[in-house]
Image (spheres, rainbow, N blue to C red):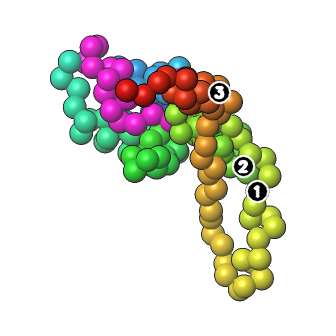
Amino acid sequence: MNVDQAMNKLKEEGYKHTDKRLDMLQLFSDESRYLAAKDVLEALHDKYNGLSFDTIYRNLSLFTELGILEATELDGEKKFRFSCSTDHHHHHLICLDCGKTKHIHECPMDHSPIYSEGFKVIGHKFEVYGYCEECGKLKEDIEKAKKTIPEN
């Protein structure tokens, strides 16, 4: 999904084109990672001084309902990102620090005994949380630095 596709989807579904919606979608496009509502508010606050959490949440919910954004929960907080532009089935690795994601092309459900249990699966979501290479290295460096600082 990209900004133009998202705006077209909104138009097809009968929703107005607004600068706030466009700027919100552009933010998700520029960031290409999971963002919380507070991240959206912080990014757009200077341009839209009266922007409220209610307006942001309403639009994030609408975007999710229309399949423009996908949502997950990280650290007890709902976060959003553009829906993947790929049509093939996949899952995600999600960095807990920066929110960047990578696709997992192997589905663990392909090897699951659930199907032999007589359970009809209608959907699933598989996310792996951890630290990307960049954030993992930074965490290691910080831990090393802490060990070299003498305690008082």
From the viewer's side, name the closer residue of 90 and 13.
Answer: 90
In the image, residue 15 lies at what x, y percent?
37, 36
Q: Quadrant of the C terminus?
A: top left
Residue 118 seen: yes
Q: Residue at x 59, y 27 (%)?
A: 144
Q: Residue at x 63, y 69 (%)?
A: 122
The part of the chain drawn in magenta is 31-48
**Residue annotated with mark 1:** 107
Q: In the rendered structure, which amino acid carries the disc numbered 2?
A: His
Judge from the rendering whether residue 71 lies leftward or rightward of residue 46; answer left or right: right
Q: In the rendered structure, which amino acid carries the disc numbered 1?
A: Cys
From the viewer's side, name the closer residue of 140 and 93.
Answer: 140
In the image, residue 150 lies at what x, y percent?
47, 24
**Residue annotated with mark 2:** 90
Of labels 2 and 3, the one closer to you: 3
Residue 142 seen: no
From the viewer's side, name the closer residue of 16 and 110.
Answer: 110
